[in-house]
Amino acid sequence: MGTIYLDHNVVVNISGIPGAPDAQALLDHAKTLQSLGNRFVLSAWNMYELARSNNQQHVEQCCSFVEALKPLWV
C-alpha cells in the first residue's frame, strides 16, 4: 500500500481527448493499483493544466476520471 503521484500527462493519456493508444490498459492498471490499497495524489498543477483546455468534453472526461480516483490533493 502506498501513495502514487499522478502527473497530468497520465490523466490525459488515460481519459483525455485524444487518449493514448493504450488508454484502456493504463486505466486497468490504475484500477488494479487502487484495488491493492494504493492512493493517488494530485497537485493543484493538475487542475491548472486541465483548465487550460478549450475542449469541454476533454475537461469533463478528465474530471470524471480524477473524481473516481478520490485522490489526495497537495
Image (tube, helix red, strand yellow):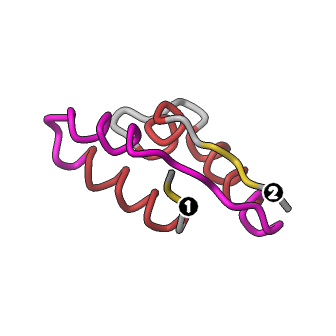
Q: Amino acid at mark 2?
A: Gly
In the depicted structure, whether residue 63 falls above or below residue 11: below
3 or 63: which is nearer to us? 3
Magenta span has 47? yes
21 or 6: which is nearer to us? 6
- Does residue 12 appear to the left or right of 1 in the view shown? left
Q: Which residue is mark 2?
A: 2
- Which residue is located at x 51 percent, y 48 percent? 42
Image spot of residue 45 (x, y percent)? 39, 37
- Which residue is located at x 69 percent, y 61 percent? 39
Callout 2: helix, strand or loop? loop
- Which residue is located at x 22 percent, y 49 percent? 57
Q: Amino acid at mark 1?
A: Leu
Image spot of residue 28 (x, y percent)? 68, 54
Image spot of residue 47 (x, y percent)? 33, 45
- Mark number for residue 72? 1
What are the residue bounds of the magenta stretch? 33-57
